Amino acid sequence: MIKVILPILLLVTGCQSFNKKQNVAFSEFQKVLTPRSKLFPINEGTESLLLIRQPKDKYTKLYKLNHKSKKFTLQYDAGQNINYLTRDRSFKNFYFLMDDNGDENYQIYSFDPETKTTQHIFGKAGFKAMPMGFSNQPEFMYLTSNHQNKAQYTAYRLNLKTGELKLLTQSKINIYSGLVDPRGRYIAVSDYLGNNEVRLYLINLKTFKTTKILSKASTVYKPAFFHPTKNELYISTNQNKDFMGCAKVNLNNPSKINWVFSDKNKSISCDYRSESNISFKTISQKGRINVEMYSGVYNKKLNVNFPEKSLIGSFSEVSNSTKAIVKISSANNPGTFYIFDYEQNTKLEPIFDLNISSIKNSEFANSYDFNYKSFDGLKIHGIIYAKKQWVNSDIKRPVILWPHGGPDSYEAHVYHPFFQYWVQNGYVVFAPNFRGSSGYGKTFETLNDKDWGGGHIKDLIYGKKALEKLNYIDSDNIFIVGASFGGYSTLSAITQYPNEFKGAVAIVALANLFTFMESIPKDPTWQNEFKTEVGDPIKDKKLLKERSPYFFADKVQIPLKIYQAENDIRTVKAEMDNFVKQLNKYNIPVEYEVLKNEGHGLSRKESWKKVMQGTIEFLNTQRDI
C-alpha cells in the first residue's frame, strides 16, 4: 500500500521540508510520445512512416502520419514490438526488424507502403540478422548475421530479387556492423576487440577481398561516410588522442589518417548524407550536444534557424526535393518534428508535437550541471533534473540517484521519459557520469576496466554527499535506482554501503559477475568487451567474487525492489532468480517482479508503467514524512 502523504509543509531546522505527494498519472504521462524511429517521408513529403507506441497501444507498431491532419493511420501490427525501421536509397523500399519479444535475435522484413504488405526477407529464430545498408543498386541488401555460427557474425550480400546470398567475409573477423559505399565500391566494417579497441577493415565489392586498413592498440576506428567523389573514407577515431575526433583516410593509401575535426576537450563525430549532399558535425562535451550542418562535405555552414540550446536529430530527406525533416528537442521538451528547405534556408514548419498530454512543456524538469570531486580528487560531472522553481527553493525534495548503464555510456542534457515522470511525481533525479563513462576521453572511460564495483561506486557515494549540501535536497530521503549496469551499480552500492540510501530499485540488473560472463552471447564482440571490462572468470576469480553483490546479499539493510525482464539475454532472469534466493536465504525482504514478454530494452507499455509508476509507489512507502 502507498502511504497517505498529507499536503502539509513543515518547518524543519529553519527551512521547509517537502511532504506533499505529487501525482501525475502514468495514463496521462504516456501521451508524451517517444518514437522508436525517425520520420521517413513518403508521398512527396506530405506523409511519413514511423515506429511509435500510441497511448492506446501495448507495444510499438508501424504507423503513417499525415502531416496536415496530424492523424496516425496504422500500417502494420506485428503482435509485438517492431524494432528499427530503415529504407534503401531509392526512398521506396522499407525494411524493419523483429525479434521474439525482446530476445534480440532480429529477423529482417520488408514493408510496401502502397499495399501495406510485409514479407520476411532474412533470418531465422534463435539467430540475429541486421542490415548494414544499401548502395545505389536497390536490388542488393548488405547485412551481417550469425545464422551459420551463433558465435560469429559474418557479412553477406542478399539479392532481394533472386534471394541469392553471397558470403563476403570469412570467420577470422567478426562483422557486427558496417558502412556501405553509396557507389557500390566498398563496405567499411569494424571488428570490436572491446569498446576501446576497434579495428577497421575494407571489403572491396568488385574483388570481394577484405583488407585490414587501420589497427592500433587501445584505439577506436569507426566508419562515418564515404566521400561522394573522392576515394576517401571519413572515420571517427581517437588515434593518439584522448577524445574522439573526425578524420579521413585516402583509400589508395589507407595507413595514414588526416584529421578533419578534433579537440582536446570535446568529442567530435561527422556524418554525410549523399541524398541531400549535407554533412554534419556533432560536438559533445559534458553531456551537451551541438550539431552543425554544412552543404557538401563541410563546404559551407548552413545557418538554419534552429532554436538555441536545442538538440537537432532524426534528420531525413524528402525524395526529389531539397526539403528535410528534423526533430528538435531539449532536456525539458520531448520534441517536435519540423520540415524545412535546407537550400533555401526556409522557416521551420512544425509537423507534429510529441507532447499530446495535458502536461505543459514548462512543467517538465530542467537539467543542471553538477560537478564534484570524488574520493581520490577526480573531478566528476553529473546532471540534475529538477523543476526550475525547486532549485531556488528551501523546500526539501527527495532524490533518485541514477547510475547509468553501459558502462561505456553517459547521461546527457536530453529528454529522459523516466526522469521526467519521476520529477513530475516530486523527486529530484541526479545522474552522475562516474569514472568509466564515455564522452570524457579515453583515459576517463577506461578507469573502471577490471574495476567494476570499485572506484565508480565511490564516485556515486561522493556524489550523494555533495548533493546533500544543496538547499533543496532532502538528505534523509535519497534513493538509488538503476538499470542494466546501473542496476549492478545499485546492488553494489547497497551491499558496500548499506546505510547510505533510504531504499533501492534495481532494473534488469546483474548481481553475479561469474554467471554474467557465462550468459552473455558467445560472439567475439561481446566476449572481448567484457573480458576487458570485467576480467577473466578464472584468472581474475578473486576480483570477480569481491565485486559481485550476489556474495554479499546478507549486507542489504534497506528496502529493495527488483524488476527483471523475462526474455533478457544481457542480464538473464536465472541470475536474478538466484540473487533473490540469496536474499531470501538471509531473510532479507525484497520485492521481485518479472516483466513478461519483455527484453533488456523495456519497450512494452505495461513494462514502462510497472517500472516508472511502480518505482515511485515503492519509494513513497519508504520515505520519511
Image (cartoon, rainbow, N blue to C red):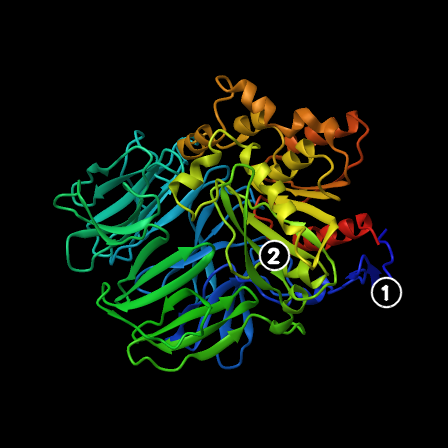
Q: Nearer the viewer, mark 2 or mark 1?
A: 1
In-image side of 455 versus 327 (left or right) = right
Residue neighbourhood size for the residue with mark 2, other residues' Cα within 10 Å, grouped as few (<14), some (14–19), many (≥20): many
Q: Give the Cα separation between the discs numbered 2 and 1.
A: 40 Å
Q: Is residue 358 above or below residue 226?
A: below
- Out of 588 and 369, give the one closest to the viewer: 369
Residue 54 is situated, as x and y percent measured from the top left of the image, at: 61, 65
- Residue 213 is marked as none
Q: List the residue tagged with mark 1.
A: 8
Given the current orientation, which residue lies at the most extreme front position? 14
Q: Number of numbered discs present? A: 2
- Where, by quadrant of the figure, is residue 516 drawn? top right
Name the residue located 47 percent from the left edge and 55 percent from the top edge.
287
- Can the viewer see residue 356? no
Amino acid type indicated by mark 2 = Tyr
Give the mark nearer the N terminus: 2 vs 1. Answer: 1
Q: Which mark is residue 59?
A: 2
Q: Which residue is painted at 66% across and 66% down in the image?
A: 392
Tell me which amino acid carries mark 1. Answer: Ile
Q: Secondary structure at mark 1?
A: loop
Question: Which residue sits at x=46%, y=67%?
Answer: 49
The C terminus lies in which quarter of the figure?
bottom right
